[in-house]
Amino acid sequence: MEILLYKKIRIPVIRFLYISAVSFLCYNYDTQAIIMPTIIPIRDLRNTSEISELAHKMQEPIFITKNGYSDLVVMSTELYEKFAQNNRIDQAIFEAEKEVEEGVAPVSLGAARKKLDKEYYGKV
């Protein structure tokens, strides 16, 4: 069964395959390989510098478990920004699709370019 961990954050590079409450496999679209995610117990959060190095080196989420259950996700700032950017793009696409479903007429590429040129560059 394939799921996404967060409803609002779609992950284009890594897809998570659900196995159990704490076990996930990750499919990395860049390398086209199934990889095991990094899962560590909450007591290991004392080693903050090691976790920081690991997060920056792997550029993947690190899953933190508490009493054997998934509790937190730690990731580098760069990876978070990538996820946030993808979320903003996905949200814009979702809103545009919703407008079309509600009956708003789509705008052609040419008309959109003319409007943007006029608005941002003063071109007519």
Image (cartoon, rainbow, N blue to C red):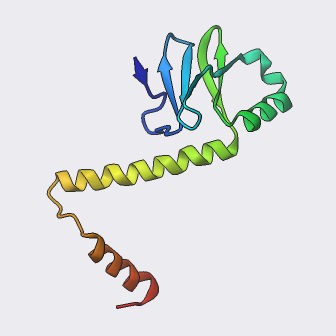
Instruction: Kindly identify the residue that appears in the image at 60 percent across and 20 percent down.
Output: 71
- Give residue 68's position: percent from left, percent from top: 63, 8
Q: Nearer the viewer, residue 22 or 66?
A: 22
- Give residue 50's position: percent from left, percent from top: 84, 28
The mark total stands at: 0
| On-image quarter of the N terminus | top left
Q: Is residue 115 left or right of residue 18?
A: left
Q: Quadrant location of residue 60?
A: top right
Q: Is residue 32 left or right of residue 54?
A: left
Instruction: Kindly identify the residue that appears in the image at 65 percent across and 8 percent down.
Output: 67
Q: Is residue 44 left or right of residue 12?
A: right
| Residue occupying the far left of the picture | 103
Q: Quadrant location of residue 22?
A: top right
| Residue occupying the far front of the picture | 32
- Give residue 4's position: percent from left, percent from top: 45, 28
Instruction: Kindly identify the residue that appears in the image at 41 percent across and 48 percent down.
Output: 90
Q: Is residue 2 above or below residue 107?
A: above
Q: Nearer the viewer, residue 42 or 16?
A: 16
| On-image quarter of the C terminus | bottom left
Q: Is residue 26 above or below residue 103?
A: above
Q: Nearer the viewer, residue 121 or 7?
A: 121
Q: Is residue 67 left or right of residue 11?
A: right
Instruction: Kindly identify the residue that appears in the image at 79 percent across and 18 percent down.
Output: 44
- Give residue 92's position: percent from left, percent from top: 38, 54
Q: Quadrant location of residue 83?
A: top right
